[in-house]
Image: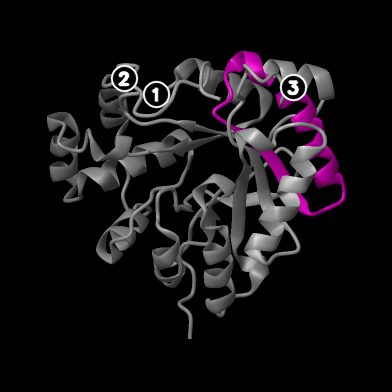
Amino acid sequence: MANQPAPIPALEFNDGHRGPQLGFGVFHVPEEETVETVGHALQTGYRHIDTAAAYGNEAAVGKAVRASGLDRQDIFVATKLWNHDQGRERAPQAFERSLEQLGEEYVDLYLIHWPAPAQDLYVETWEALAALRSDGRAKSIGVSNFRVEDLERIIEATGVVPVLNQIELHPRLQQAELRRFHEQHGILTEAWSPLGKAQYLDDPTIAGIAEAHDRTPAQVVLRWHVQLGNVVIPKSVTPARIAENFEIFDFELSDDEMRTIEGLDAGERTGPDPSTFS
């Protein structure tokens, strides 16, 4: 029998739906490993799975969801539209392919993966996603890697505010201005690469806080995200790490510790720049 889910906080979206604050990401998880890895995450208690057309593992995610023994309504599935599928006509076709790959009749969250501003198609793509939301097959819609100017443009053009923006965010890239814009407009911040691809987990500041709480550096960073109010989607294929990343709701960082981590911001990206990536 599948394990009962742990008490992961659910955050309210601006469209009235809700989603688990902690999710499980499958970026760069090989398709042949995805069923087992996602299955283990679901057994651990994760109920939010984040994939994308570009990851090449939507079918395996769908298989893991069906094999879990859990009710579909208890699992939050998110996927994303890739850059070459942007546009009023191509976006709905790409969405259909994602549903087919997942083996689902709907997804809980559908995102534009990148703004790809050089293409200048993200406004009409956003209009296409709004139509998908209207017919109920994308319960909620959002964006990923959008800058303030991109968000302002789609909101002004359509009146539809994304439920969240999934962005690179970790102690070395805290995106304070963008997070302020999100807060002002009721957009949740979702962090990809929340651990900075593990590049900063040996930081002595993080290590000292971890030692004080008898926790790992990864748990401290994930807890920092949670206390900021971020949705967070760590990724691992190691069962012990999957479990470790889940165990972040039974301790709390102090205000001083939160401020100390805030001081680590250096504007360092580990991934592409949204202003130029296409």
Where does the image place residue 258, in percent across and percent down from the top left?
Answer: 31, 29
Mark 2 or mark 3: name the one nearer the start of the chain: 3
> Left or right: 197 with respect to 48?
left
Look at the image and tell me whether residue 253 can be seen: no
In the displayed structure, 95 sits above or below 105; it is above
Residue topped by disc 3? 154
Assess whether residue 256 is covered by the magenta stretch: no
Q: What amino acid is labelled 2 in the image?
A: Asp
The residue segment tinted magenta is 122-151
Look at the numbered discs 2 and 1 and tell me whether their residues touch, using CB distance below 8 Å: yes
Residue depicted at 13% across the width and 36% down the height? 208
Q: What amino acid is labelled 1 in the image?
A: Gln
Question: For the residue labelled by badge 3, is the local secondary structure a helix, a strand or a loop?
Answer: helix
Q: Dot 3: within a 10 Å radius of its alpha carbon, few (fewer than 14), some, or many (20 or more) residues?
A: some
Q: What amino acid is labelled 3 in the image?
A: Ile
- The quadrant where residue 100 appears: bottom right
> Left or right: 54 with respect to 199?
right
Look at the image and tell me whether residue 175 can be seen: yes
- The quadrant where residue 137 appears: bottom right
Separation of marks 2 and 1 at Cα, in angstroms:
6 Å
Separation of marks 2 and 3 at Cα, in angstroms:
28 Å
* 3 vs 1, front mark: 3
Look at the numbered discs 3 and 1 and tell me whether their residues touch, using CB distance below 8 Å: no
- On residue 174, which mark appears? 1
> Left or right: 277 with respect to 208?
right
Separation of marks 3 and 1 at Cα, in angstroms:
23 Å
Question: For the residue labelled by badge 2, is the local secondary structure a helix, a strand or a loop?
Answer: loop
